[in-house]
Amino acid sequence: MTSQPNPFAPHWLIRDIVIGSHKAAVGPGGLLFIGDSIVEGFYWNRIGSLPVINAGYSGIWTEALEPRVPLLLESAQPRIAALLVGTNDAKKDCTESALDGVAAHFERIVGHFGDAGVPVVVLTPPPIEQAKRLTGFYSPEAMTSLSRRILQIGDGRAAGILDLQSAFADGNGAAREGMTTDGIHLSAQAYRLLRGMLDQEAALLAPEREDR
């Protein structure tokens, strides 16, 4: 993927500028939410007692995100972080060998949080909702396989794990009706559920001080 022209590069440049301004406004000690377009579309500016720095990059995949993470951690100095990436790695015709490479990059990303001493909540990519506009571009099997790898990587290394692959699924492994707008990106209903899950994690990892 890295040898091909990147159609998202102009958008990522704009996001770098926006995120830089957001970091300056929030300051250190917030919640840094890092990931792809599902993160970029997260529209709350506060989780629990913490202001949110939205470091979502539409279209980004795990390998491309990896070098950005230590830079974001160093500049944002968050109290805690959340990580959601992998959807754009689980495209149609993705092989298990390719997913092994994705998992290696994901493991290195998790290591960056440990190196920075920042507790991270790891999220699995949400499931695909069938028969919608973007459904055919992604592989449900690859998404499930990658999510399983992410759970294994996060076990014992992440401060918290949110398994959206299970939480948003119907009984057959696909997303429940109404969880997405286009088969991949979350609906308002799903975002509200996600926010509630993050609120619970933030309350455990960064409880509000009684002296405020």
Image (spheres, helix red, strand yellow):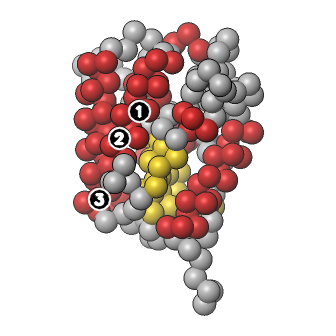
Residue type beneath disc 3: Gly
Secondary structure at badge 2 equals helix
Looking at the image, is mark 3 or mark 2 earlier in the sequence? 3
Secondary structure at badge 3 equals helix
Find the distance from the CA under tag 2 to the CA under tag 1.
6 Å
**Disc 2 vs disc 1: Cβ atoms closer than 8 Å?**
yes
Q: Position of residue 119 (x, y in %)?
A: 40, 62
Q: Nearer the viewer, mark 3 or mark 2?
A: 2
Q: Quadrant of the N terminus?
A: top left
Q: Tell me which corner region of the image, top left, top right, bottom left or bottom right, holds residue 105.
A: top left
Q: Position of residue 88 (x, y in %)?
A: 44, 25
Query: Does 44 sit left or right of 64 as displayed?
Result: right
Q: Position of residue 21 (x, y in %)?
A: 50, 57
Q: Quadrant of the C terminus?
A: bottom right
What residue did someone put label 1 on? Answer: 148
Find the distance from the CA under tag 1 to the CA under tag 3.
21 Å
Residue type beneath disc 1: Arg
Residue at position x 26%, y 19% from top? 97
Residue at position x 51%, y 18% from top? 140
Looking at the image, is mark 1 or mark 3 earlier in the sequence? 3
Question: Label 3: how many residues lie within 10 Å, few (<14), some (14-19) or many (20+)?
Answer: some
Q: Is residue 191 visible?
A: yes
Residue type beneath disc 2: Gln
What residue did someone put label 2 on? Answer: 152
Outermost residue toward the front in this view? 171
What residue did someone put label 3 on? Answer: 114
Residue at position x 55%, y 63% from top? 202
Residue 182 vertical placement versus 56 (above, below): above
Q: Nearer the viewer, mark 1 or mark 3?
A: 1
Query: Does 159 sit left or right of 180 as displayed?
Result: left
Find the distance from the CA under tag 3 to the CA under tag 2.
16 Å
Residue at position x 66%, y 26% from top? 170
